[in-house]
Amino acid sequence: MNLKDCHNFSDFRKLAKKKLPSPIFHYIDGAADDETTYERNTSSFNDVDLVPNVLRGVENVDLSTTIFGKKLDLPFYLAPTALQRLFHYDGERAVGKAAQKFNTMFGVSALATVSVEEIASLVDTPKMFQFYFHKDRGLNDSCLERAKAAKFDVMALTVDTITGGNRERDLRTGFTSPPKLTPSSLFSFATKPMWGINYLTKGKFELPHLQDYVKEGTDTNTSIGQYFSTMLDQSMNWKDAEKLCSQWGGHFALKGVMSVEDAKRAVDIGCTGIMVSNHGGRQLDGSRAPFDQLAEIVDAVGDKLDVICEGGFQRGTHMLKALSLGAKACSGGRLYLYALAAGGQAGVERAIEKYKAELVRDMKLMGCTKISDLNRDNLRFRR
């Protein structure tokens, strides 16, 4: 199997599994506890049926949308994810260049393996910086100032990692950042020699936004769950978020909002957007899927800020359902991470092209020529 054999989300996942050592693959693939929420994030779309219209003249389809004051050519973007250098040696460079090719937004994590300065020099597509609120205030100030100086368009404060989720796959495989060999993982790394060669020869693994402040993650091995639980500030509250919003002074979003109450408070503190998200099912297992919460959040605040549905998307039809409920855009991490592992920049581009082709085809089959044509009349709920 190679990249040309990848036609959908599942195919990219299969190829990524062939290329990555087991601990690295399962870090992408896994979630919290019994992974019930992770599975629900996608299965929730199956509870809703699309109702198409015909004879609407659909020769030309416009997929563009506007979020955070930026027009994107696609109604989805590549959400920020950590440690991308582990999945492919080009990491965030590959993802950013692919996003630029399709004029969509690209997110960079505070736990990225390429700096905001380098990303800014490489791509001019709209960019989001994902902010983690650390105990170290100097680190927080540094991340904010560097992202601002690099002229990132959006700051997204992640609010659903107040402690690490129970990611049992990582416990079983011994996954850490940076990776370390253990008796149980030695065979897996040995059977993926190209990954090891690329990891050792394509530049040093670094977390450039963190390494001047903390050793964990770059020089000291740590799991992501342990990092969240020990390095992030568990006293973070609404006043901290409001202050950060003010300090940033531009488009500001909360990433990980799941309740109407929190969505309303996001408006009150000056947010211009929210990501309805449960962190890919990697935090609180048993929580609702973003799609299940989307309608009531859109009804409460959709006219006051940009509501983005994040997580679980594996098909263009999934995106159409979220957009029909009122999401301004869709986003995801696994959406492109398997493709990154499968083929670097070329893999991400192929994945985006596949989703784009699905959206164009499905919009035509729905009788819609632009995103604003989508609405709740297109949907019927099974439950």
Image (cartoon, helix red, strand yellow):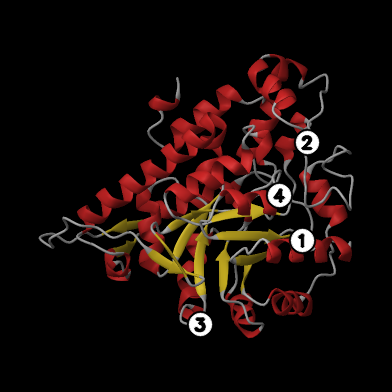
Residue contact at pointers 4 and 2, CB within 8 angstroms: no
Distance between mark 3 and mark 1 Cα atoms: 28 Å
Q: Earlier in the sequence, mark 1 or mark 2?
A: 1
- Mark 1 or 2, which is nearer the eye? 1
Which secondary structure, mark 1?
Answer: helix
Q: Which residue carries the number 2 mark?
A: 171
Amino acid type, callout 4: Ser
Residue marked by disc 3: 304
Crowd band around label 1 with a 10 angstrom C-alpha radius: few (<14), some (14–19), many (20+): many
Q: In which quadrant is the C terminus drawn?
A: bottom left
Give the residue at the far bottom of this rendering: 268
Callout 1 amino acid:
Cys
The quarter holding residue 7 reads: top left
Asked if one can make out residue 368 in the rendered structure from this viewpoint, the answer is yes
How packed mark 2 is, by other alpha carbons closer than 10 Å (few <14, some 14-19, many 20 or more), is some
Is there any visible trace of residue 313 in the rendered image? no
Residue matched to label 1: 143
From the viewer's perspective, is the residue at label 4 or at label 2 nearer? 4
Element class at badge 4: loop
Horizontal side of residue 56 vs 231, given as left or right: left
* Amino acid type for the residue under numbered disc 3: Lys
Q: Nearer the viewer, mark 2 or mark 3?
A: 3
Mark 3 or mark 4, which is nearer the start of the sequence?
4
Q: Residue at x 20, y 57 (%)?
A: 60
What x and y, as percent, mark residue 149? 70, 64
Identify the mark nearer the N-term, 1 or 4.
Answer: 4
Q: Which of the 4 image quadrants contains residue 1?
A: top left
3D distance between C-alphas at marks 1 and 2: 29 Å
